[in-house]
Amino acid sequence: MPYLSSLRSNAALVVALSLLTSVRAHGYVETFVYGGTNYTGYLPYNDPYMNPVPDRIERVIPGNGPIEDVTSEDIRCNTGGTAPAALYATAEAGSDVEMHWTSWPTSHAGPVITYLAQVPDGSNITSWEPGTDTVWFKVDEAGYEDGKWAATDIMVTEQNNVWYWTIPSGLQAGQYLVRHEIIALHSAGTYPGAQFYPGCSQIEVTGSGSAFPDSSYLVSFPGAYAGTDPGITFNMYTTFDNYTIPGPALWTGGSGAASSTVASGASSTAASSASSTAASGATSTAVSGTTSAAGSVSG
């Protein structure tokens, strides 16, 4: 029965490939919620094959795989992320933000971190690239606290693959590049080993705030991380009490600085106040509206 034999072989191949895919699968943000509006992120397995290729607020990412070299420019906005996106979202300072990730493996424990970089006067987010300039500051971080990892125990188990954070309420109005990442530590006992999953979305922050971090909070990518950082070379399978989140001190929007030595749980306030209904429904909704010449999207 050659036909049945071939059918069984093909079926076995499909199963094997699906298992391999599930093992290698990682993740990326597929939907952003800024200012109460849902924006579809760059979809690496769909967008390149569409005609025309859709405009997004997120810069290109190649897929769901990691970056492992902290000295590479890919650590900034992922591979291919140097090219600006065509659109940007609008959100008010002090508003809550949702990052809806694709299914994230529970083995990939680690911190979740968010940075902002302000677009200089005279430039536009749809054409600006920060390069290696020292312009990034950390506005949200969570690592390991009370026996829970941010990426898995909190984001996956408690929040259904959604991460919540809040734009600092006093932040100066303007255009910003948002760098949001998970660092997976399941293979981080030696360097390279930690896996970085960054992505960059584009926003315009509105409001009357005037606060902006001083130079002590600003870092560059690459430059912010080193392979020897205790939060990057880290054996999560040993007994430990604290985990040091990599990067600069957390900027909270005021005059004081929060330590990044232990997970601050900075996102917990936003998570508790955000609507669970909106969180569950946003992943399937693409933004609709008009695009201005500047590239903004109005809902």
Image (cartoon, grey):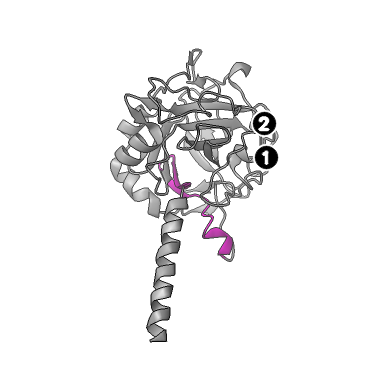
Determine whether the residue tagged by mark 2 lies in a helix, strand or loop. Answer: loop
Magenta stretch contains residue 42? yes
Tell me the quarter of the picture where residue 128 sits. top right
In contact (CB < 8 Å): disc 2 and disc 1:
yes
On screen, residue 143 versus residue 60, left or right, reads: left
Q: Residue at x 69, y 32 (%)?
A: 132
Q: Residue at x 48, y 22 (%)?
A: 170
Residue type of the residue flagged with mark 1: Trp
Earlier residue among tags 2 and 1: 2
Question: Which residue carries the number 1 mark?
Answer: 128
Residue type of the residue flagged with mark 2: Pro
Please name whichever residue, 84 or 78, is drawn nearer the observer in this view of the structure. Answer: 78
Please give the label number shown on residue 120.
2
Please give the label number shown on residue 248.
none
CA neighbours of label 1 inside 10 A, class few (<14), some (14 to 19), many (20+): some
Please name whichever residue, 175 or 177, is drawn nearer the observer in this view of the structure. Answer: 177
Determine whether the residue tagged by mark 1 lies in a helix, strand or loop. Answer: loop
Q: Residue at x 55, y 59 (%)?
A: 47
* Region rendered in magenta: 27-50
Query: In this rendering, is residue 288 above or below 97?
Result: below
> Percent position (x, y) of residue 220?
64, 28
Query: In this rendering, is residue 135 above or below 80?
Result: above
> Percent position (x, y) of residue 135?
64, 27
